[in-house]
Image (spheres, rainbow, N blue to C red):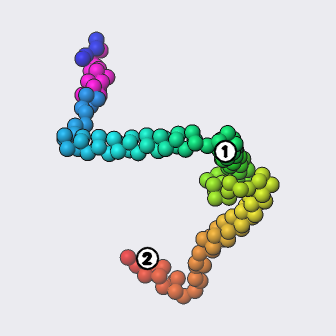
Amino acid sequence: MEDNDGKVDTTVEVSKENEKEEKKEKTFTQEQLNKYLATEKAKWKQESEAEKNEAERLAKLTAEEKATEKEKKLAEKEIELNYKELVGNAKDVLSDKGIPASFANWIVSKEDTAEKVTEKIEDFSKKFNSELERMVVKRLAGDVPKVGAENNKKKIARSSY
């Protein structure tokens, strides 16, 4: 389309191309579709069978066993929540120390306490920084330029070209 200024409006053309791309759908052969449906049906049956077995198992439990089961699940959730909180705090501390936060997952374990994580971070920080400093010094050291006749010969040879 042209405006009064004689310019072509490319937005209309681009939107038409986008509509064509959106209308293209991936097609499957009947064999591929049957295979996909069969695998999904098998997964569904397995999941529903597991749920049914779990429901039967829970129905057979006494009130005392059910309470114990709930306590176990709550304890597991509490441990998981505590772990996520420790990892989040560890990431903050590591970032403050200039260390990549991705190391938090290696430092924190599910059995750790906040005090133990703090100790681990301090220890890791010292080791990380000393190793980092050692590597920087090693890379910066490099080769020392040679002084003497060899350099003069090379300069003369290069300048004669």
In the rendered view, does 49 fall on the left or right side of 141?
left
Instruction: Give the image quarter of residue 73.
Output: top right
In the rendered image, the quadrant that contains the C terminus is bottom left
In the rendered image, the quadrant that contains the N terminus is top left
Q: Depth check: 123 or 67 in front?
A: 67
The numbered dot on residue 159 is 2
Magenta-colored span: 5-20
Q: Amino acid at mark 1?
A: Glu
Q: Secondary structure at mark 2?
A: helix
Instruction: Give the image quarter of residue 47.
Output: top left
| Mark found first going from the N terminus, 1 or 2 | 1
Q: Residue at x 73, y 56 (%)?
A: 112
Q: Residue at x 64, y 59 (%)?
A: 106
Q: Does 75 sit above or below residue 147?
A: above
Q: Depth check: 80 or 146 in front?
A: 80
**How far apart, in angstroms, are the residues tagged by discs 1 and 2?**
92 Å
- The question of residue 28 being in magenta is answered with no
Q: Residue 79, image x and y in percent?
A: 69, 48
Q: Is residue 125 visible?
A: yes
Q: Secondary structure at mark 1?
A: helix
Q: Which residue is the site of mark 1?
A: 65
Q: Does 78 sit above or below residue 5?
A: below
